Image (cartoon, rainbow, N blue to C red):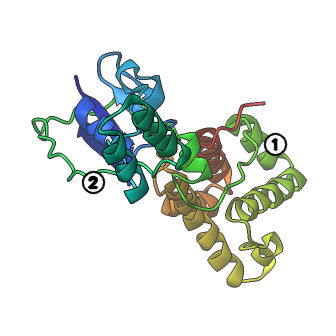
Amino acid sequence: MSFQLHKNGQYIPCDLAKLRDMARKGDLAQDEYVYDERIKQWVGAAQIAEMKDAWNIGENEATVAMDLTPEMLAMFDASQGGGAAVAAAAAAAQSKPEPAPVQPAARPPQRVSEPAPRMPEPRQEAPMSRSSSASSSRGPSRTAGKIEDPTMTTLKNVICFVFAILWLIKTYDEANNFWGEKRFTWWHLLIPIWGIIVMWKFFKNVSEMAQAVGANVPDRAVIYLVGQMCTGGLLTFYLLQTDLNAIWQHMGAKRA
């Protein structure tokens, strides 16, 4: 049976033995997603039937010899193995606190044979696991923006200049909330020359946002800028809102 993990932007082929070994070592969280080729979909690692007990660490038992004191040995000698002395010795041994179980030496990790280098591309993109967002990802939390219809957004912005300004304010605020800091100020666009530089930085920022959350959004900063200069924003409004929607949807935002 074959599985795949999505880590650090790569798909890693695994078999069941490797998944169980990763779970025992703490390298695989129970809620981390695994692509199960048997059913052709992504599932939580703990949802795989063969993995349900992979995170249970069994307690090893060890036999500990009973420590007999000199007084107990003398009682045995005096009675020559009599039943009363044996009972007294047993009672004395039971009254002593039991020593802690001896932990066995850690076993070296088992070498797992790698499967054949066959890496079929999954049909669907790996979803973000809960541990990634909290911190399997171990990164800062992100705030998703609002999903809007690109066609309606473009029409409103072209028909009325006020709508375009309000849309710019909204998108800049969403980018600042995403990074958790104020990186962009919309009214800087009104400053000659500097406004073009700010516009270009914001267009490049869309690709950076997509890479930060793993969304499949191309870098179209040049197309945004050309569309802004040559079409009066008609092309830019539509493409930019479409790419922002893809980022918000990848982060779990729902269409209103």
Q: Is residue 222 visible?
A: yes
Whether residues under marks 2 and 1 lie with C-beta atoms below 8 angstroms apart, the answer is no
Residue 61 % position (x, y): 35, 39
Which residue is the extreme one toward the top? 39
Residue 221 is labelled as none
Packing grade of label 1 (10 A; few <14, some 14-19, many >=20) is some
Three-letter amino acid code of the residue under disc 2: Ala
Q: Tell me the crowding category of disc 2: few under 14, some 14 to 19, or many 20 or more residues within 10 angstroms, Cα based.
A: few
Instruction: Give me the residue at 45% from left, 38% from top.
Output: 90
**44 is higher (above) or lower (below) than 201:** above
Distance between the Cα atoms at labels 2 and 1? Answer: 67 Å
Q: Is residue 32 visible?
A: no
Residue receiving disc 1: 156
166 on left or right of 78: right
In the rendered image, the residue lying farthest to the right is 162
| 159 and 66: which is toward the camera | 66
Q: Name the image quarter holding residue 140.
A: bottom right
Q: Which residue is labeled 2 in the image?
A: 106
- Residue occupying the point 63% across, 60% down: 228
In the image, taking residue 183 as reference, residue 117 lies left or right, namely left
The C terminus is located in which quarter? Answer: top right
Q: Residue 148 at what x, y percent from top left?
A: 74, 38
Taking depth in this image into account, of 45 and 226 the one nearest to the observer is: 45
**For the residues carrying marks 2 and 1, which lies nearer the camera in this image?**
2
Identify the element where label 1 is drawn.
helix
Question: In x, y percent, where is residue 128?
Answer: 53, 41
Q: Amino acid at mark 1?
A: Lys
- Given residues 186 and 109, the one toward you in this image is 109
Query: Image height check: is 80 above or below 167?
Result: above
Name the quarter where the N terminus is drawn. Answer: top left
Looking at the rendered structure, the secondary structure element under dot 2 is loop
- How far across and how far down the image is residue 200, in percent? 59, 71
